[in-house]
Image (cartoon, rainbow, N blue to C red):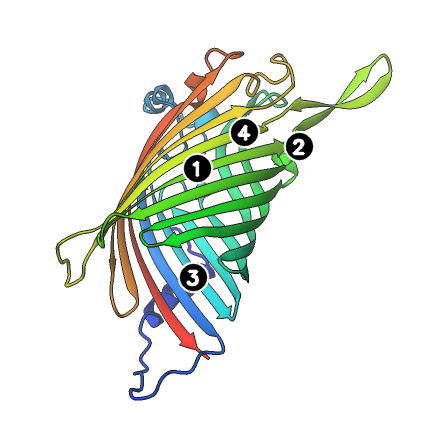
């Protein structure tokens, strides 16, 4: 039997006690502006993913008859059931909002892939429709999969810990009638432990979004993103003619362009006495790797382009006592093309499907 952490037990307990305010509001008097508000949210989600290790079709066929060694060591199944539990606290006062969240992901079969995510987000209103954000995220350990090592000449278990810090500014350019326009600018820094130092990066992103309400029931929108990621790269000693210097041997830097279309529809029916909402999203994402290292030293990144497609759909229900339900589906496909490594797509292409059910509760306190 798998042992769940104390965090899981505490979060499940919070699910039982949050969700109902229990304090009737007094009538007759206009409520005073609150000095602050505190909102506690907690939730559970179960997701079935048919390709949790993002393996190619050929690898998935190979796994059916392969022994549990080499690149298949520590892998019980390629599909899995992922259970998530979380708690989030939000403090708001005046122009300031502080939000802290802890989330645990538990893989039913591939227990080694389970991990925790902790985050802290601070938002400050800086002016009229102008906001600043400071975001911090920490993952103590995340297992990727078995990866071939040139040092040991064998497949080794690869995992990492990482910290991420981001500073973002958002400007709501227009809110006129049914039309809304906004733009974002963001700086990110991500730091991995020593086993993945080469993936430490700084990134800059610009994002724009436009949405339009076609009616009271239908809203559509489009988002565009450009992101430039500059990785540290893998640095190795280079001994030439007795002179030792450092050189980069791998560079995963890339430029990314993303286009997303979405729609939200309030269905003309009732479910459990509530009006459900249907949301759909379609995304196209293109990464062009920007390494300046030769194809001989960096064949995995030189001349490489990744094209990724995603489609998401969900149905959501909100209840007056602070409970939300969501049923979702997500499809992803990645196609990798390389001018330097012809068969790279055979190692990196993948398709995945995921179905999820989520329940969340919220409880507000007003001071």
Tell me where residue 127 appears, x and y as whole percent: 54, 60
Kindly identify which numbered label has been placed on residue 224.
1
Q: Which of marks 4 and 1 is nearer the N terminus?
A: 1
Mark 3 burial class by Cα count in 10 Å: few <14, some 14-19, many 20+: many
**Separation of disc 3 and disc 1 at Cα?**
31 Å
Task: Tell which circle, 3 or 2, labels the residue nearer the N-terminal end.
Answer: 3
Q: Residue at x 24, y 65 (%)?
A: 319
Kind of element beneath mark 2: loop
Q: Position of residue 47 (x, y in %)?
A: 32, 45
At x 62% / y 37%, what residue is drawn? 201
> Is residue 355 at all visible to an observer of this figure?
no
> Disc 2 designates what residue?
232
Q: Is residue 88 visible to us here?
A: yes
Q: Which of marks 3 and 4 is nearer the N terminus?
A: 3
Q: Looking at the image, is mark 3 or mark 1 earlier in the sequence?
A: 3
| Distance (Cα) linking label 4 and label 1 | 14 Å
Q: Where is residue 18 in the image (x, y as percent from the top left)?
A: 35, 70
The crowd level at tag 2 (other Cα within 10 Å; few <14, some 14-19, many 20+) is: some
Reading the image, the residue beneath label 4 is 255
For label 1, the crowd category at 10 Å Cα-Cα, with few meaning under 14, some 14 to 19 and many 20 or more, is some
Q: Earlier in the sequence, mark 4 or mark 2?
A: 2
**Which element carries disc 1, helix, strand or loop?**
strand
């Amino acid at each position: 039997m798998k042992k769940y952490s104390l965090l899981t037990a505490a979060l499940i307990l919070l699910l039982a006690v949050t969700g109902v305010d229990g304090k009737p509001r007094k009538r007759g008097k206009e409520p005073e502006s609150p000095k602050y508000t505190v909102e506690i949210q907690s939730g559970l989600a179960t997701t079935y993913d048919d390709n949790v290790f993002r393996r190619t079709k050929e690898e998935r066929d190979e796994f059916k008859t392969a022994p549990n060694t080499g690149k298949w060591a520590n892998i019980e199944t390629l599909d899995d059931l992922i259970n998530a539990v979380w708690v989030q606290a939000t403090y708001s006062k005046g122009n300031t909002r502080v939000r802290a969240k802890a989330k645990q992901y538990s893989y039913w079969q591939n227990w080694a892939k389970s991990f925790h995510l902790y985050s802290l987000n601070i938002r400050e209103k800086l002016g009229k429709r102008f906001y600043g954000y400071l975001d911090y995220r920490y993952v103590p350990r995340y297992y990727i999969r078995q990866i071939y090592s040139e040092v040991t000449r064998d497949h080794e278990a690869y995992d990492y810990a990482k910290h991420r810090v981001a500073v973002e500014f958002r400007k709501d350019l227009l809110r006129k009638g049914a039309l809304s326009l906004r733009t974002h600018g963001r700086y990110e820094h991500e730091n991995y432990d020593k086993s993945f130092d080469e993936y430490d990066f700084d990134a800059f992103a610009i994002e724009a979004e436009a949405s339009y309400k076609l009616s009271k029931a239908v809203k559509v929108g489009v988002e565009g993103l450009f992101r430039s990621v500059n990785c540290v790269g893998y640095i190795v000693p280079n001994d030439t003619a007795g002179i030792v210097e450092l050189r980069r041997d791998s560079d995963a830097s890339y430029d990314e362009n993303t286009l997303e279309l979405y729609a939200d529809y309030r269905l003309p029916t009732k479910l459990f006495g509530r009006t459900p909402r249907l949301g759909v999203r379609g995304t196209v994402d293109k990464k062009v790797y920007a390494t300046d290292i030769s194809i001989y030293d960096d064949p995995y990144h030189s001349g490489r382009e990744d094209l990724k497609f995603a489609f998401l759909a969900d149905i959501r229900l909100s209840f007056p006592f602070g409970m939300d339900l969501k049923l979702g589906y997500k499809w992803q496909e990645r196609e990798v093309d390389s001018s330097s490594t012809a068969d790279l797509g055979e190692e990196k292409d993948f398709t995945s499907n995921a179905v999820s059910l989520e329940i969340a509760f919220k409880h507000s306190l007003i001071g």
